[in-house]
Image (tube, rainbow, N blue to C red):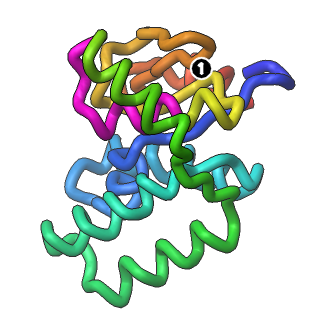
Amino acid sequence: MTATSRFTVDTNILIYAVDRSDQAKHMIAEKIVRILIARRAKLPLQCLNEFYRATTRKRLLQPVEAEMIVRKYMLFTDIEAATPEDLLQAMSLHQQDNLQFFDSLLICSAIRTGCTILFSEDFQNGRTFGSLTVHNPFTMEDAELHLLLS
């Protein structure tokens, strides 16, 4: 990652950081989240909404535990809410690229906030959306992930 590169994450990274059922993914996600917090990186509010819902619905966490983690992210990352312009662009992206709507909204918000890297397992690895490139950290070699995070 260059000095001008900034990264953000999709909700699945946050979930794997607390879900120990797949140790390999858990370790990678935990590493990414530690760096996310250390750099006070951008984190979409949408991801916190989805994280709370998914972890409590799947019973990975008790509601009070999920809330504590959400509050930690709110304290130690730069939370970015979607804007009306993000919404308009997301609707267009959704229609043009046949993406899930909330994935489109995440992409548009990330681009607006200056992120150039999105870590996610839900998109084609290496796919670009304008200045944003999606990377699946779970299919990368350690050296490649380290380079993107350094």
Q: Is 65 one of the magenta-colored residues?
A: no
> Is 85 situated above or below 64?
above
- Hey, which residue is sitting farthest right in the picture? 3
> Is 97 situated above or below 57?
above
Residue 147 relative to residue 72: left or right: right
Frontmost residue, 149 versus 103: 103
Image location (x, y in percent) of residue 9:
49, 41
Determine the residue positioned at 22% across, 71% down: 60
- Hey, which residue is sitting farthest bottom in the picture? 64
Q: Quadrant of the C terminus?
A: top right
Q: Is 102 one of the magenta-colored residues?
A: yes
Q: How many marks?
A: 1
What secondary structure is marked by label 1? helix
Image location (x, y in percent) of residue 37:
67, 57
Q: Quadrant of the N terminus?
A: top right
Residue under pointer 1:
143
Determine the residue positioned at 71% across, 30% down: 114
- Hey, which residue is sitting farthest left in the picture? 58
Determine the residue positioned at 29% across, 85% down: 63
Near mark 1 (Cα within 10 A), the count class, few <14, some 14-19 or many ≥20, is few
Query: Most prominent secondary structure in the magenta stretch?
Result: helix
Residue 26 relative to residue 21: left or right: right
The magenta region covers 97-108
Image location (x, y in percent) of residue 83:
55, 46
Image location (x, y in percent) of residue 136:
40, 24
Residue 61 relative to residue 83: left or right: left
Determine the residue positioned at 37% across, 49% down: 11
Give the residue type at disc 1: Ala
